[in-house]
Image: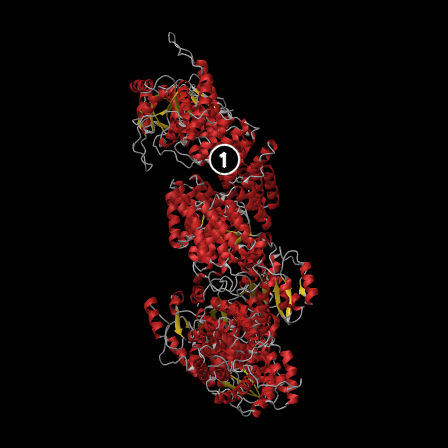
Amino acid sequence: MTSTAALLDQAIDRHRAGRLQEALDLYGRILRAAPRHADALHLSGVAAHQSGNSDLALERIQAAIAVNPRFPAAHNSLGTVLADLGRYEAAARSLATAIDQDPAYAEAHSNLGTVLQALGRRQEAAEAYDRALELAPGSTAARLNLGLLYRDAGRLDLAARCFHELLRTAPGHVPAWRHLALALRGLRHPDAEPCLRRALADAPADPELGRELGGLLAEQGRTDEALAVLETAAATAGADQLVLFTLGTVLQSTGRLAAAADRYEQALALGALPGAFNNLGVVLLDLERHERAVPALRAAVALQPDDPVALNNLGTAHDGLHALDAAETCYRRSLMLRPDYGKALNNLGGVYKAWHLPARAVELRRKAIAAQPDYPDSYTNLGSQLQDLDRLQEADLALRRALRIDPDNADAHTARGLVLSLLGQTGAAEAAHRKAIALRETLAEAHANLGMLLWQASADAPAARASLDRALELDPDLGPAHLNRGMVRLALGEIGPGWDDYEWRFRAKGYEDRPLAAPLWRGEELSGRRLLVWREQGVGDEILFASCYPDLIRRVGHLVIECDRRLVPLFQRSFPAATVRSQSIGTDGRETIVPPDCDAHLPAGSLPQRMRRSLADYAEQAPWLVPDPMLVDRWRERLDALGPGLRVGIGWRSQVMTTERRAAYTALADWGAIFAIPGIIFVNLQYGDCEAELRQAEERFGVRIHRWPDLNLKDDFDGTAALTASLDLVLSPAMSVGELAGALGVPVWRFCGMDWTQLGTGVRPWFPTMRLFQPQPGETLPAVLERIARTLRHTLAEATCMPAGEASPPSRDVETELSRAIALYREGDAAAAERLARDLLADVPDQPVALHLAGLITLRRGEAAEAAGLLARAVAADPGNGAGHAALADALQALGRMEAAERALRHAAAAQPDNAGVLVNRAVLLIRLGREEEARCCILRALRLRPDLPLAHTHLGNLANSLSGDLVQAAACHRRALALDPAGADALSNLGIMLYGLDRFVEAERLLTRATLVDPGFAEAWTNRGNALDSLGRVAEAEACHRRAADLRPDLPEPHVNLGLLLRRAGRPTDAAEACRQAIARDGRSAQAHYNLAHLLLEDGQLRAGWTEHEWRFATPQFLGQRRRFTAARAWKGENVSRSRLLVWREQGVGDEILFASCYGELLNRAGHLVIECDRRLASLFARSFPGATVRAETVDPRDIDVQVAAGSLPRLLRPELRRFPDRPSWLVPDPALVEAWRERLAALGPGLRVGIAWRSQLVTAERRGAYATLEAFAPLFAVPGLTFVNLQYGECEAELQAAEDRFGRRIHRWADLNLKDDFEGAAALTANLDLVISPAVSAGELAGALGVPVWRFCGPDWTQLGTAVRPWFPSMRLFQPQPGEALPEVVGRMAAVLRRTGEEPAPPSTPLPSTLPPSTPSAPDDPDRLLAAAAEHHRAGRLGDAAPLYERVLRLRPGDPVALHLSGLLLHQTGDSAAAEPSIAAAVAAEPGYAAAHASLGSVRLALGRPGDAIRALRAGLALRPDDAALLTNLGNALDRSGRLEEAASAHRRAALADPALPQAADNLGTVLLRLGRIGEAAAAHRQALALAADLDSAWQNLSVALRRQGRLDEACRAVARALALDPALAEAMANLGRLLREMGHFARAERWCDRALRLDPGQPAALFNKSLLCLTRGALSDGWAGYDRRFDGTEMTGGARQPGVPLWRGERLDRRRILVSREQGIGDEVMFAGCLPDLIARAGHVVVECDPRFVPLFGRSFPQATIRPAPDRQDEPAEGVDLHIPIGSLPRRLRRSLAAFPSREAGYLRAAPQRVALWRDRLAALGPGLKVGVAWRSGLLTAERMPDYTRLEDWGPVLAIPGVHFVTLQYGDCAAELEAARRRFGTAPAVWDDLDLRNDLEGAAALTAALDLVIAPAVSTGELAGALGVPVWRFGRAGDWTTLGTAVRPWFPSMRLFLTRADQTVADLLPEIARVLSSLGSGR
């Protein structure tokens, strides 16, 4: 018989093999034999559950537990069965029992995790899984489930880590591959694709894997691969809705719309899916299936009624069906949900366009652009709308903007083509349409537009037809293409097909047929029936189509005609058999006759299609309009009263003059040839407001154009018809006047272009009495009018004959009378000559000579207007009269009509081609018009005719100067003029002026003196002579010349202008300003006077007035040709341009460009978009420096801008006062890569201060020479040791450099591969690496200042100083200006002295060198007194190398000399050897205890050696001797400061300031201490006091910068530190401070560059090392970073912060059996963060003693039980007993975290809260109700201006606190009750708070509460650090650039922490809405 044990083994074997029934049978045999066999009961229950019999399973397992209550495996199995049955609470209890019985039972922990996860208790579940994995690291189930838990919680990074760890132990684990792939996909990890493919290989039918892989491939643009994967998934996964949906989206993105629609419909067949409905609707819209799109989109909206996109799409569908009301409703609903939805605004604009409400449409399109500036369709539609409004320039601008956004937008290209064609740019228009077709050949609109353009521009019928046919092939319903093809067909004579296409006109123009209930007439028989014909288009078209009415009346039973109300009487009379009425449709488009009183209807324009299908249908067309006979008789009488002559009615333009129509019309000014024809009576037929035009024409041409005020030509068509019928002829363009005349049968001469209404003929078949005058190729309409005039004149000549019986008037001898008149004129009797000429004109009105003579005499009398009329008639009568044209030009110039005058002179030159004088006169006029090149051509032609014409040579010389600045050529021309006229004062003066411009002052003065001798009254020569004398240094004579000129010509401004310049240079600014004002008083438009006054005002600090005058600069010769003209942009006057594109354009030189570019940063914030046009060499530098702007080289008349301003005009608008200059150290940003390259090249030069030098401008004139130096003048600089010189002088200067190197023995470094003139990128990168730039007023210095590099500029006073001693534009610039009598070389010497001093540490204030020494007597050379005096003199002068050996000689002769001991020690200290200095100075004190100065020096030395206590004792000894010594007192303050005794230090500095109020160092040092005491405002005030005493105290600027930084005023801080560096370019501390500032501003590369510069000068500079370390850590360079971080205590801000326990510092050596002390530092947040290193240290050391904040002792004691935890002592130097080594806690990472791999991969935290208190808090939190429990903090307890940007206010938390289902708990320590109460009032809720918990001081309680929470959200405060250390999930939000991220996207210290970091232009508070969105999804998923 088999034993029970053997049966059990067999059963288990079967069980393990999956043979469950066999196993159950064997378990049954055992239980029958032993019913209480616990194992059999348990295992049989498990097998029963696995077999699906859960009831039996529960029964057996519970029985097993009843037999053996301590049976962990059974409790585990019971929990598993209960969980599978969904009884999770009971399951959790069973599993907890199993764990209680066996705490190491890994499977039970894992199962418990699964149950807790199902219960939503994620944190507890994670802890259970973690415990399971601690016990069984290889547990795949626990690790898989933990990963799934993390994935469900949104922690995909942790989930992926779990799945990855699982696969390392089980590489073939199929679920792990699946979940890892999905997690990586969610993280967008680069390994997602291979993982997805690996997972799909295991599970090819998994739809989610296929969908995600397909989506990933589609995102990468690999659409073919994506489609293959998704098609496979769709085939293998069966009907998976999301796979089908994803497949549809990919097909849609590739343009396979029909296939996409099929897939969306398949997906929707499986269930409602809003996205699928919406996408299906969009696809159907793209397929033009609007009817099917509507229900799909309605379903999308029904499912998601708050989806603005779906509503917009539904509106688009309704729009496509012309259901505009429904479309508008949808668009408005969409905009209610999302008011800034650009596409909906754009589409709503389309609705209003269709409703013919253009203003509203434009407004909506502009709103759409503002809401969505990157959506090109809005710009395109706006452009089209503006085109319709004839705002073509605006339209072109909008379309160009569309194309900038999307250069391949075919719709925008063809829309722009339409605009360009209207602007007359047909070539560009054609190119635009062809570009559109090239981009999208299927764009029917582009083909249609091209076709019409080809027809209109070149009458290319075949090409036009081909394009239009192609358009209709692509879109048979394209109305404009049909209409355009119809007009082309009609123009070609294809009348029937043409009228068929013409029927599309309503659809083409967006109009609808009238909604009449009657049918449209198709041409069928209508006898006995009523037909309504209704009006359309304009009155002219009504009259044209009315030609069909007589035939129509005969064809229908009765005709009803609806016409313009003004035509009703005329049409009633003309068509008496018809009913004529005004239109019966209201202004709202509704019919007013309902039901209609007709049987059929038709628009008038459709009549030809029914009735005029061939030319034969137009034969024998009789007049069809009948005027009122009575009115005709009345008008004939009125016309008869005008006398005999041909009665000609005229019209010349339409009332509506659009750009498109303007070319078809004329102005009355063009009618001169017609008005000159005698014998015509002109009658006005031009309706509308034209009285001014008529009067002007009458005055100009001396003709009467008759009109009558009692006839309203616009509205009284009956009266107009009667008048027209009484005329002999009508002349008109294409306007209703001509149509009316033709319809009345009056002869009409119509001047117009080719017209489709000609129907392929040379006439208009509608109007038999109409004759066409059309332009020939190249002929203009004014030329056509001249042709009409000739024809009319000829016609009249042929028709003229004397009536029978009438006597002819007596003949006059015209020639004789003319000769007499001319003789009288020449004799001087102009009055008699005029009477005779006018008498002749009475009989012969067009006699040209008489007109000419009368015009000349009238002009002499000063009546220019009448003269111009007479002379115009003279040249019209005799166009070959050159003298007449010239006289007309004089008259027109007198009237100010310069362009017309120039045309007259052109005619004169054509009539007299050999008249050189006319050519010269025309040249003079062209110069006045600014057309100088044309003027030059005229002069050259004149000189070919008359080489001996002095005036021509003079003008040619002036043009050579103005056109090219070629003064040599100009002088040569003036010499020729002088040779031809040696005594001519003008010639002498002109040549003198040119020689003056060539700096040939002596010759100029001689010639100008001759000019004044030849003509003593020649004022211009006198003042020009003054200029020459001024340049020769003869100032008094020059002033006398200017004053003489002013006396000679009181009205002449130039003498006062020149006098002002002289007085300004002479240092008499008040007199100079008065001279400028005198010039302006004489000529308010004297630009030079205004410009000179501008400089004087600006030099005086009067900025507003100065900048206003500065605007005159472009009218001065210096700025000739620099002003730019713009046709498409207005000038910016300072108005709001936030929605405009603003162009700033360059002017003047590169240096000025750089200077004015300081304003560009502000413009970026003010303009909608900034466009900068600069010197091409600056383009890339400016583009990097102003990244939000478009930067480019100069363009010609750009059209992509709205407003424009010259760069030099910006200060007037942005810098009207000094306080408007921003606190910004720099504004240009060099290329980082080039900067790095130059840094390496300069580093190779070796140590030393790197000084860039320039010495002159490239263009050195006599006037400018005094502002520059030669390299010889740099001798004092070349003598300063320790400098490395770098050349910044551009241009040809190699010979000068070599000569200087040879002479001074100094190398001036330059590089052949750097072109300093043209490569500004390279020059900027080189300059940015320099420590100092020394230059005069040249662009090299401006560039350095704009880069923030210290600049020393040597120059005279400059207006750009704006009344100050600095240049406010450049904070890093220091000015060295000549003192009275000082030359520039002496200034350079002064600079060298300052630079020499900056290289040496100055003596402390307390230790001045003795000014006197004991008297000495003449003695031998080794006399110690003489040697000591000489040594002290060298010492005082800074010649330390000469002083040191003399001190040694003194001490050899007199070893105990206290003065020599003191001063030699002081010299050692000053040269950096303080250790060697101390014994010497101590010996001096010992030898002479009363030597106060020696005590002071000893204190300074000991302080430098880091022994502040000894220093204090020495300084107090000195003060005992000199109690009121301010220097000693302030040095004592410094020593007390270093000892951490801050209040005592402040007191000492105050005493020093009282002792010597003029000692700036005392105030400066006091400020430093106050800053460390946190009294930042007082500190800044103290530093400013120091600067008030000594503006050049570089340390005060540096310290002020620190205070400003602490106040959060970073820009001002940068400006202050730049000032410090300008004063001392070698100030390493200031460089380090600037590095820190830039780091805090986020400019990391620049920050590191400044830190490196500081370290190059001072390798041990602590602030630079510390800031560099943070920068290294920020980018992940941990090794370098931690090394520098250890220097944190060496800087001033953490002085006294280092623990000094009396034991060595641990430097990383082995710690076996050694005891180490870890001391606290900084804040408690840092303590918590660095405490993460303690477990590793504890594992290494024999024993660890931790000193911490007393509040942390219990928490740290529990968390690190192997260590000794004790509170930190009060004093840093308190000895530590029982330890061997020590280390500050912040230094542990240097030893234990040298790489990211060294951070432990733990999930739990390293701090442990008290379990009992945690449980208590969990209960208290549970009482809040179900939902996430989230702790929040919003700010630090210490809020300073510097720290404020890192924090928020509780009022910012509205989006977070509004999330439902989440309970917020305050973790904000300190007093925040008022903030919480305000939140309750504002939001209706606030975070929960417990008054019995002190979150600031009870850190044990705070830790317990935190540990009980689900999540903590906090900025950078200790609250978040504590949560992270406890392992609680933390969301930390803050500014980007946090060094503790160590170059990662996380904080490796805290695995449970997630970061939310700001992006550009975001504040920390801006992150809260994003946090709210993420939290909302987490809360809803719980």
Q: Position of residue 675 (x, y in %)?
A: 42, 24
Badge 1: how crowded within 10 Å, few (<14), some, or many (20+)?
Answer: few
Q: Position of residue 1443 (x, y in %)?
A: 63, 80
Q: Position of residue 414 (x, y in %)?
A: 51, 40
Residue farthest to the top? Answer: 805
**Is 1851 in front, or is 260?**
1851
**Is 853 in front, or is 417?**
853
Task: Place residue 1740 in its image quadrant.
Answer: bottom right
Residue farthest to the right? Answer: 1302
Task: Place residue 1440 in its image quadrant.
Answer: bottom right
Q: Is the image coloured rainbow, by chain, by secondary structure, or in one colour?
A: secondary structure
Q: Amino acid at mark 1?
A: Pro
Is residue 1270 visible to the viewer in this orientation of the structure?
yes
Q: Position of residue 1234 (x, y in %)?
A: 62, 62
Residue picked out by circle 1: 476
Q: Is residue 474 left or right of residue 1279?
A: left
Where is 339 relative to 482, above or below?
Answer: below
**Is 1017 in front, or is 769?**
1017
